[in-house]
Image (cartoon, rainbow, N blue to C red):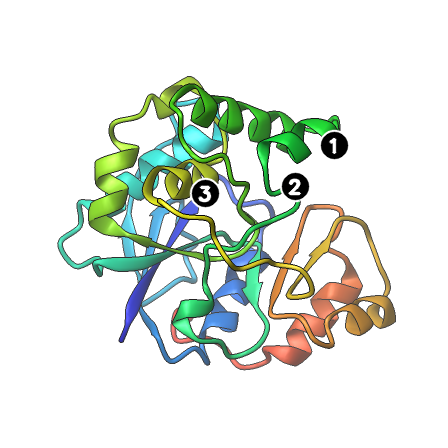
Amino acid sequence: MKVDVVYTLAPMSKNGEDWELRYSLRSLSNQPWVGNIFIVGYKPEWVCNAIHILLDDPYKSKDANIIRKVLKACEHPELSDDFIINSDDHYIMNKIRLMDLGPWLEYPSSLKDAYLKQVVSRWYIRLIKTIDFCNRRNLPQWVFESHIPYLVNKQKYQKVMSNIPYDKDNGLMTHIYYNLVLKYSPLKTIQGTVVRLKKEETYEEIKEKLKSCIFLNHNDQGLSDGLKQIMSERFSKPSPWEK
């Protein structure tokens, strides 16, 4: 079974070389389930063999712009019924099964734990907005790992996400989508399978962390020379989507 992968990209790249997208695409090259690549929004000139949908970002909310772009991709007749939503700073470090692409629970995984954590960050604010939205609608309030690629259904995504006020900054799209469509408690947990780099680390430190992980994610501070060297060694061959 082949499924397509949708990237939603902001109008301007983070850097001139679009390093993240290049290596995120390379990390997909060995996955047997990858179908078409869709890029919605900004597309670097070096990207090839991908379906591009040009779309701007009219909202201040990052989440609202992403949801709008995914809904636009869902309108495309060639998009597979089930597809993967991915970000340019998400990488799959080992060959995996399609069923391994979620949903995965993250800690804090519930409303109570999220409020108790009391972390002051933009992510935490977005998370609490999402949980509050689910709470008001008597939905489940599970917190899902949003820093890995994840599998959604086109018809379900269109049905549930087009009928919520996503333009009102209600929070993280991953959590809202899965809490809208799931009628049971998820069984998967992300512990031990994902590495998130939030600060600059050395080549040796990163290599040790990546020994047994499946997924890798980083923020701007984690995009170090050591990480670039490791990824260039791990994924040295250009992907079919770059020229």
**Residue 1: mark:** none
161 vs 59, nearest the viewer: 161
Q: Quadrant of the C terminus?
A: bottom left
Horizontal side of residue 113 vs 240, given as left or right: right
Residue occupying the point 72% across, 73% down:
230
Between 112 and 25, the one nearer to me in the picture: 112
CA neighbours of label 3 inside 10 A, class few (<14), some (14 to 19), many (20+): many
Q: Mark 1 sits on what residue?
A: 117
Which residue is found at the position 23% from the left and 40% from the top? 158
In the rendered image, the quadrant that contains the N terminus is bottom left
| Residue linked to disc 2 | 108
User: Are circles 1 and 2 on residues that touch, CB within 8 Å?
Assistant: yes
Q: Nearer the viewer, residue 89 or 108?
A: 108
Q: Where residue 182 sits in the image (x, y, percent)? A: 36, 45
Do the residues bearing badges 3 and 2 touch, measured as CB atoms within 8 Å? Answer: no
Which residue is identified by label 3? Answer: 174
Dividing the picture into quadrants, the one containing residue 111 is top right
Mark 1 or 2 closer to N-term? 2
